[in-house]
Image (cartoon, rainbow, N blue to C red):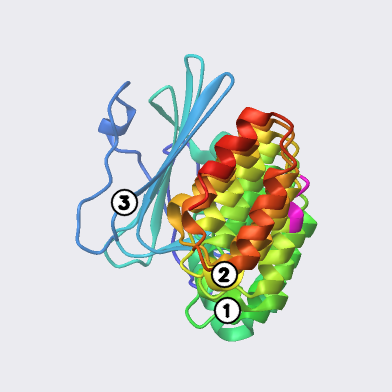
Amino acid sequence: MHKAAFLLWAASLAGTASFAGTTGPVMLVAQPDTATVPGLEYRSPKGTGAAGQQIFLNSFRHGSERLAYAGAITLTEDLQDIEDISPMGYVHYTYLVGKNKKRLVFESDASGDRFIISYYENEEGHSYRPLGEQWRRQIMPGLIARSGIGLEARVQQVYQQQGTEGVLAEADKIAYAEGKQHMLHHLLLQPGLKPAEAALALQYLDRYATSDEQRSYMLDKVPAPLLENDALSHSYLVVAQGISSDAELRKSLFSLLQAPNLSRTTVNKAMHVAGKMPGHEKAKVLQQLSGSEQFNQRHYKAAFSLISGMTSDHDKQEAIFHILGKHRLSPAQYQELLPAVSQIHSDQIKSKVLRGIAPGIPKDATAARTDYQLTARTIYSAYEYRMAMDALP
């Protein structure tokens, strides 16, 4: 563990203390006069040692919080506090409720052997102990979870040493779902991640997720090339089925259907999940599926099945025309689509859809033409029937 001498800007405080797991004397120095000037924006030392600044902003009902930091941030073993900051790095945290403002500032010196902590209330410098220290202990676990500060480095370190199971064990140390989400996000970004490891991450997600947004957000982070693995895509759909919002579920199905080389098994399972959604949402999912380059070769059967399950004639019409606008179907494919057309109740819509299909059926495609004629006979309106038959070449 890095043993640093911590400078507490507290002219009124004297003695020794243990801090962030580090024991030993704490160096006490007088607080600089400029730091006590009300309204003065305290700025960290400039140098080349700190990495680019990152900022986390969060608003809530009665106020807001802002976290700005740079450099390598090392967390304590229990992931509840900051243990160390790389040379010239810093952490500035501001919490504002109404007109009341609190601020904690951590800054590391050029050597990295020590970092300074200062505490402000309404821009007036105060002794770090006891109020600043108490506030720090109160806010840090939640702040780390919400912002993700320091978690990326911990995931990288643990993944290299202990793999996915080690990272998930670390995530268990965080009580907040947001922090676990940060951990899984960084895990899914690890180079060389295997499908089985991603599946473990999703199984963990399924246990802790407390909102549709968390599920949808994390599913979107699964590397698309890995989803050709059926076991991983199954885990993906298990998590997706825990989403109650149709809009968020559609986003997750979109992300899955954009992945290359999905198996027919995966697409069929995805269409089964989509089949439980309202008609207009089914249509949107179908539009996504029809955009696949592999639609004609691998996915059209699942798409036609989804169309058959739509209850709205209008949704069926829109879905079919979307497919016809993107793909040139074979006579055999038209034969598989026509049963879905026959289920349309409106004579006008059914006739219109058939007229859209007719130009694609060759004159020598006897079986497809016969099925077309049989479908047209389910139209009760003589006018609409004639319109559909006249459209056939």
Write down the residue under mark 3.
53
State the image coordinates of residue 249 (x, y, percent, origin top left): 67, 47
Q: Which residue is found at the position 48% from the left and 70% from the top?
A: 3
The Cα atoms of the two marked residues, 3 and 1, are separated by 25 Å
Magenta residues: mostly which secondary structure?
helix
Write down the residue under mark 2.
187
**Which portion, as a residue range, is magenta?**
272-276
The Cα atoms of the two marked residues, 2 and 3, are separated by 22 Å
Badges 1 and 2: C-beta atoms under 8 Å apart? yes
Does the magenta portion include 27?
A: no
Badges 3 and 1: C-beta atoms under 8 Å apart? no
Local crowd size for mark 3, using a 10 Å CA cut-off: few (<14), some (14–19), many (≥20): few
| Residue 159, disc | 1
Query: What kind of residue is marked 2?
Result: Leu
State the image coordinates of residue 129 (x, y, percent, origin top left): 55, 40
State the image coordinates of residue 184 (x, y, percent, origin top left): 61, 63
Residue situated in front as seen by the camera: 187 or 251 = 251
